[in-house]
Image: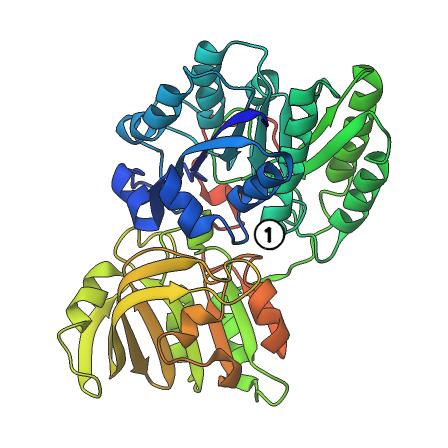
């Protein structure tokens, strides 16, 4: 009979500048599934849970998966939501387990604590004691704390951004848990950190210095006493004391020697902190380029980094859309515009009719512009259910809630109710928009969009609309981040 393993998924990336709290309903809007439901919905996709189940089958584990819960990035997690999500895990933790596997993000901040993951581990350790091995998977945009490393023996982050190796990371962490439960290894995870809000390029692994860092990490992992090296870019939209990039080494033995490796990689992030790959255009400059683009080589893809719902922005910034309309851009698509009231109102208009309304800019007009008053032709309306087709969410279901497409002066605007960043072609195609045939594709995402949109793009440019995830950190009211922290 194989080992008995307890598992849970509780995932949130918290933007502490977002004024909207993350409630239980926010988790239900993305997914909040009991164990068996999670296995059915997510157990054979690009998920950490699938990697865990792969390994469990290989070794004959008895796995009890208690919960899978994730909310879209947003404001601080409420006490009620935290307690609700923890309840099934803590109830099951009283059993007789050989190991524990946790699927976390690494950047959760709650109403009562800067270190949500540290609190998860602390409450769990209070029940299971200090010795049972715990393996944790992380997003590389984690702000990994010293408490997390003290309370979990194994911490392993994805190695790609865009994140295409999620399932592989689950399997990798589970393989280490197997060895720890069998007594073949006795791992611990050490940490190196630098006083920065984030790595210069947000952890991009498709280009730039992170390629060499990961090559170095993989070379070090060939040593028998180094089990995993995780390079985390950090998440800069969290006003907390332990913000920023870290290097984690899950290892055995000589901690001083392993610490030196971690420090070497962390120091490289520090010394190369000015080596930025992206040039962030103003919305006016981006719109001028779009107006001049002929589309013969494929669409011009404009990514609004600052209004990325995947980092906790509101997704209702109007600055880029206003600039595109002002520049007379045609044959374009834009999305998502997250405006639940507009999406609901548009459900009353027949397809083909003309609708006039106030769109976007309702949450925090100082970040990315106020509402636009527009008229356009209704192209599509209905339920915003999407099944992904690309490398990140292929086969996984997401829902935009009530959704509409409004064509305004040659721009098809995807108007939705529930926040998701744009990272899959199906998020346009499902609603009658073919981005490959557009001259200009404007979307709200950071790096993740590249996995699906780079193959169809004639060119990619990035813009900072001044929304909540602006790269102009001086515009954000940091209070808890220690000084000095680069670039503050």
Q: Is residue 351 above or below residue 61?
A: below
Q: Residue pushed farthest left?
A: 348
Q: Nearer the viewer, residue 187 or 472?
A: 187
Left or right of 441? Residue 185 is right
Q: Is residue 408 visible?
A: yes
Image coordinates for residue 68, horizontal then vertical, percent: 40, 39
Query: Based on the displayed image, in which of its 4 quarters is residue 135 positioned?
Result: top right
Relative height, residue 335 to residue 252 (above, below): below
Kindly identify the residue that appears in the image at 25 percent across and 56 percent down: 362
Dot 1: within a 10 Å radius of its alpha carbon, few (fewer than 14), some, or many (20 or more) residues?
many
In the displayed structure, 264 sits above or below 41; it is above
x, y percent for residue 252? 77, 19
Residue in view at x 45 percent, y 55 percent: 308
**For residue 407, which quarter of the picture?**
bottom left
Classify the position of the C terminus by image quarter. Answer: top right
Identify the image quadrant of the N terminus: top right
For mark 1, what is the residue? 163
Residue toward you, 184 or 459: 184
Vertical placement of residue 50 versus 334, above or below? above
Q: How is the image coloured?
A: rainbow
> At 48% from the left edge and 79% from the top edge, which residue is drawn?
435
Relative placement, left or right, of 30 versus 185 is: left
Q: Position of residue 347 (x, y in %)?
A: 17, 72
Taking the image as drawn, is residue 488 in sight?
Answer: no
């Amino acid at each position: 009979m194989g080992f008995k393993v307890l598992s849970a998924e509780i995932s949130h990336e918290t933007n502490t500048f977002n004024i909207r709290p993350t409630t239980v309903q926010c988790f239900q809007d993305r997914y909040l599934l009991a164990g068996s439901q999670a296995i059915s919905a997510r157990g054979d996709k690009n998920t950490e849970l699938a990697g865990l189940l792969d390994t469990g089958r290989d070794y004959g584990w008895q796995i009890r998966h208690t919960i899978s819960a994730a909310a879209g990035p947003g404001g601080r997690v409420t006490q009620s939501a935290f307690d609700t999500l923890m309840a099934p895990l803590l109830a099951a933790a009283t059993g007789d387990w050989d190991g524990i596997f946790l699927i976390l993000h690494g950047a959760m901040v709650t109403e009562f604590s800067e270190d949500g993951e540290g609190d998860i581990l602390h409450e769990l350790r209070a029940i299971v004691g200090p010795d049972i091995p715990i393996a944790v998977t992380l997003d590389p945009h984690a702000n990994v704390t010293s408490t997390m490393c003290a309370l979990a023996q194994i911490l392993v982050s994805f190695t790609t951004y865009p994140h295409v190796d999620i399932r592989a990371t689950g399997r990798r962490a589970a393989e280490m848990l197997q060895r720890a439960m069998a007594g073949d290894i006795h791992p611990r995870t050490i940490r190196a950190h630098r006083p920065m809000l984030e790595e210069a390029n947000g952890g991009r692994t498709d280009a730039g210095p992170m390629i060499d860092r990961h090559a170095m990490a993989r070379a070090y992992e060939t040593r028998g006493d180094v089990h995993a090296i995780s390079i985390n870019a950090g998440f800069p939209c969290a006003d907390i004391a332990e913000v920023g990039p870290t290097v984690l080494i899950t290892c055995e033995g000589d901690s001083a020697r392993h610490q030196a490796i971690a420090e070497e990689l962390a120091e490289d992030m520090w010394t190369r902190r000015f080596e930025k790959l992206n040039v962030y255009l103003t919305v006016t400059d981006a719109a001028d380029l779009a107006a001049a683009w002929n589309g013969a080589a494929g669409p011009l893809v404009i990514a609004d980094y600052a209004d990325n719902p995947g980092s906790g922005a509101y997704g209702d910034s109007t600055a880029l859309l206003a600039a595109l309309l002002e520049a007379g851009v045609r044959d374009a698509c834009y999305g998502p515009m997250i405006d639940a009231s507009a999406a609901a109102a548009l459900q009353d208009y027949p397809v083909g009719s003309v609708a006039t309304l106030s769109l976007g800019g309702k949450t925090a007009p100082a970040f990315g512009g106020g509402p636009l008053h527009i008229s356009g032709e209704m192209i599509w309306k209905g339920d915003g259910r999407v099944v992904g087709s690309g490398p990140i969410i292929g086969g996984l279901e997401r829902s935009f809630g009530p959704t509409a497409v409004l064509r305004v002066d040659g721009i098809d605007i995807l108007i939705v109710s529930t926040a998701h960043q744009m990272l899959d072609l199906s998020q346009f195609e499902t609603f009658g928009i073919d981005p490959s045939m557009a001259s200009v594709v404007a979307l709200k995402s950071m790096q993740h969009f590249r996995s699906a949109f780079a193959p169809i793009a004639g060119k990619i440019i990035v813009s900072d609309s001044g929304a909540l995830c602006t790269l102009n950190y001086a515009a954000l009211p940091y209070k808890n981040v220690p000084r000095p922290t680069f670039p503050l």
